Amino acid sequence: MFKIGEFARIANIGVSLLRHYDRIGLFKPAYVDPESGYRFYHSEQLSDINRIIALKDLGFSLEEVSQLVNDNISTEEIRGMLILRKSQIREALREEAARLRHVETRLDQIERSGQLLEVYDITTKSLPAQQILTTRGLFPDFNVVVQTFRQVALPERIDQFGPMIAIGHNAEPDHTKPVDLEFGYILRNPVLNPPTSFNDLPFAMRELEGCDLAACVIQTERDVDHIVSGALGIWLDNNGYRMAGIWREVYHQLTPTLVLEHQVPIEKRS
């Protein structure tokens, strides 16, 4: 028989962990001296403690480990628990991969923050109420967003009505849910009989509410939206502001060069 220290060294496990497993009934010593309270273990118990260590390494809780090693459960039940654990690990890996991408993007923004704030001149101004002609919907994925954008971004309609506008209504964007977007035009002049549909999309005229203060930045390159968003986020943090309403993108020009103005209603953080 081995004293607890010797057994712990052989099994490559801490003495305190062996005592804890004894207290909770997960793994008990072969013998406890009634006078000294010393714990002793048989060499045959090494296979049992190794099984417990292996199950813990798979991520099972102590309660689940206890069920697997102490209860008389069938092979099918063990198989089911392992399949469930496999699914949990895969989901955790997906979540961690997404979190890693967010961290990498944030690090890139921080490393480039000086350049971002220098290149993208962020200004503040009030936004007046405006008449807009738009179509609105819930978009399940980015491909549908792009398709709808292309249906709306027609040069002849922009010439007819005015600059194109995109409005995001999701206060807290959640990539697992459809995004609530509105696409259309800022009307340069009053329209007496606005069209109710064109290009297979329903349209309606309404007033877009103004705001007292908005942070605005001009983007002239395509495919750098995340960089502009990073610049806006850094500027908001540095100047003590937070978002206070729906964001807008006004496309002053689509071709030959993009001229896009990001407009974010803001307020001072309390």
Image (tube, rainbow, N blue to C red):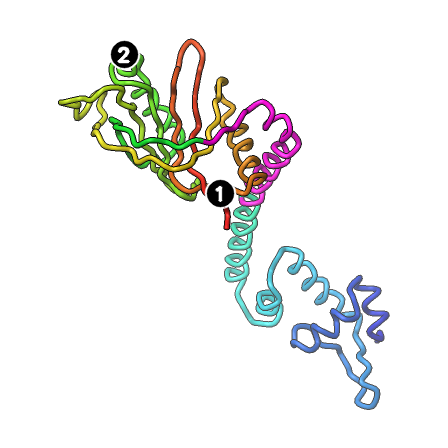
Report if residue 106 lies within the magenta region: yes
Q: Label 1 is placed on what type of residue? A: Arg
Q: Position of residue 207 (x, y in %)?
A: 25, 33
Q: Quadrant of the N terminus?
A: bottom right
User: Of residues 167 and 30, which is closer to you in this image?
Assistant: 167
User: Of residues 10 and 62, which is closer to you in this image?
Assistant: 62
User: Of residues 226 and 23, which is closer to you in this image?
Assistant: 226
The image quadrant of residue 99 is top right
The image quadrant of residue 247 is top left
Q: What is the CA distance from the residue labelled 1 to the residue labelled 2?
A: 37 Å
Report if residue 148 lies within the magenta region: no
Above or below, 241 relative to 25: above
Q: Locate residue 95 relative to residue 114 in the image: left or right.
A: left
Range shown magenta: 95-124
Q: Position of residue 77 (x, y in %)?
A: 51, 62
Residue at x 50%, y 57% (from the top left corner): 80
Q: Are marks 1 and 2 in contact (CB under 8 Å)?
A: no
Magenta residues, dominant SS class: helix
Q: Label 2 is placed on what type of residue? A: Glu
Residue at x 58%, y 22% (from the top left corner): 119
Above or below, 247 relative to 115: below
Give the residue number, with chain letter if any, for mark 1. 242
Q: Secondary structure at mark 2?
A: helix
Above or below, 245 relative to 154: below
* Other residues around mark 2 within 10 Å, as few (<14) / some (14–19) / many (≥20): few
- Of tags 1 and 2, the one toward the viewer is 1
Give the residue number, with chain letter if any, for mark 2. 156
Q: Locate residue 225 relative to residue 188 in the image: left or right.
A: right
